[in-house]
Image (tube, helix red, strand yellow):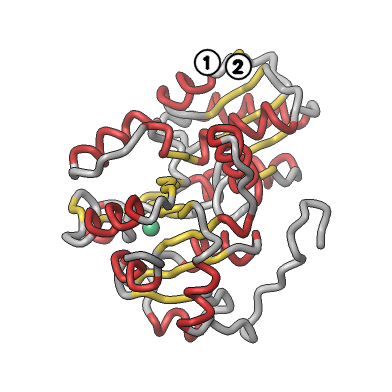
Amino acid sequence: MNKTGRRTVITSKTDIMLTKNEFRGRLEGVKCILLDLDGTLYQEDHIFDFTLEFLEGLDACSIKKIYLTNNSSKGRSDYYKKLTAMGISLNEDEIYSSGDATLDYLKRCTDCRRVFLLGTPSLEAAFTAAGFTLTTDAQCVVMGYDKTLTYEKINQAYKLIKSGASFIVTHPDTLCPIRNGGFDIDLGALMQPLIYATGVAPVIIGKPHAPIIDGLLEKLSSESGEQFNLQSLAIMGDRLYTDIRTGKENDFLSILVLTGEASRDDVARSDVVPDFILERNVDLLNYLPDI
Ligand SMILES: [Mg+2]
């Protein structure tokens, strides 16, 4: 065990997937599934035609859902609008982004309340609503997926970090998928100039890192009044190096679906091995009790 209570997990090619019976057994303890969005529930703006049946099946088994995204450029209300427009019935507080997790981390683990934020207007609004003061006289620099990034902002961030301000980034993705199979540059690349110039490694909050999972466990436990732990969780996603690594590095159940980025060939070549592979999200219902 390490100091967070997790096993020290070393991901290696020797990891093996669960058998069908082992998978069924592990699912018996799962009370909440963390759902990746693009590639898992929908592709771009088109919901898979089996996704609503899957979500209704989880409801029938009383399994909670968290819609989990690393993208901190959009707020909860943006995702709420997108998901409801697809016909998904949900509450806004079932959405948890790396931006939400960063707010929870700052409140839970630091005394930083004055923040220099590199972020979009929606992320700025979330910080202000949570009681943080956005200022250049800051205790910490928080870098989100800032599509309004300027030289002035990044230079100010450099000066603050060099002067001792903490350096926190919302998520590590290098590229963000866009329409027609292309990609935009994302925060994992945009943070590199600051790391290079300051020599400071940031605290990273989002998938596959621990703070987003610690934040979720606390949120789930406090909202429901019952205890959630790593054995209560599973994550389902289409990317090995974010979604599946989140499960492997944090020591909880990981399920790969083949409707997005990764294929079985990718799994065969990867050091990150999911606990189980399903063709589609809805295939999980075959392994849940009382369906
Ligand atoms: Mg995805």
Ligand number 1: quarter of image: bottom left
Q: Quadrant of the C terminus?
A: bottom left
Q: Tell me which corner region of the image, top left, top right, bottom left or bottom right, holds residue 38.
A: bottom left
In the picture, measured across the screen, residue 84 lies left or right of residue 92, that is left
Q: Which residue position holds label 2? A: 132
Label 2: few (<14), some (14–19) or many (≥20) C-alpha neighbours in 10 Å: some
The residue located at (56%, 74%) in the rendering is 272
The residue located at (83%, 53%) in the rendering is 3
Q: Which residue position holds label 1? A: 128
- Place of residue 40 in the rendered image (x, y in percent of width and height, measured from the top left): 33, 60
Q: Is residue 189 above or below residue 164?
A: below
Q: Tell me which corner region of the image, top left, top right, bottom left or bottom right, holds residue 143.
A: top right
Q: Is residue 198 above or below residue 130?
A: below
- Place of residue 31 in the rendered image (x, y in percent of width and height, measured from the top left): 50, 53
Q: Amino acid at mark 2?
A: Phe
Label 1: few (<14), some (14–19) or many (≥20) C-alpha neighbours in 10 Å: few
The residue located at (62%, 84%) in the rendering is 13
In the picture, measured across the screen, residue 264 lies left or right of residue 130, that is left
* Helix, strand or loop for disc 2: loop
- Place of residue 98 in the rendered image (x, y in percent of width and height, measured from the top left): 52, 41
Q: Is residue 241 above or below residue 19?
A: above
* Helix, strand or loop for disc 1: helix
- Place of residue 218 in the rendered image (x, y in percent of width and height, measured from the top left): 63, 38
* Label 2 CB sits under 8 Å from any ligand 1 atom: no
Residue 275 can be seen in this image: yes
Q: Nearer the viewer, residue 112 or 180?
A: 112
Q: Nearer the viewer, residue 44 or 85?
A: 85
The residue located at (22%, 53%) in the rendering is 52
Q: Amino acid at mark 1?
A: Thr
Q: Nearer the viewer, residue 152 or 110?
A: 110
Give yes or no for contact between labels 2 and 1 (Cβ–Cβ under 8 Å). Answer: yes
Q: Quadrant of the N terminus?
A: bottom right
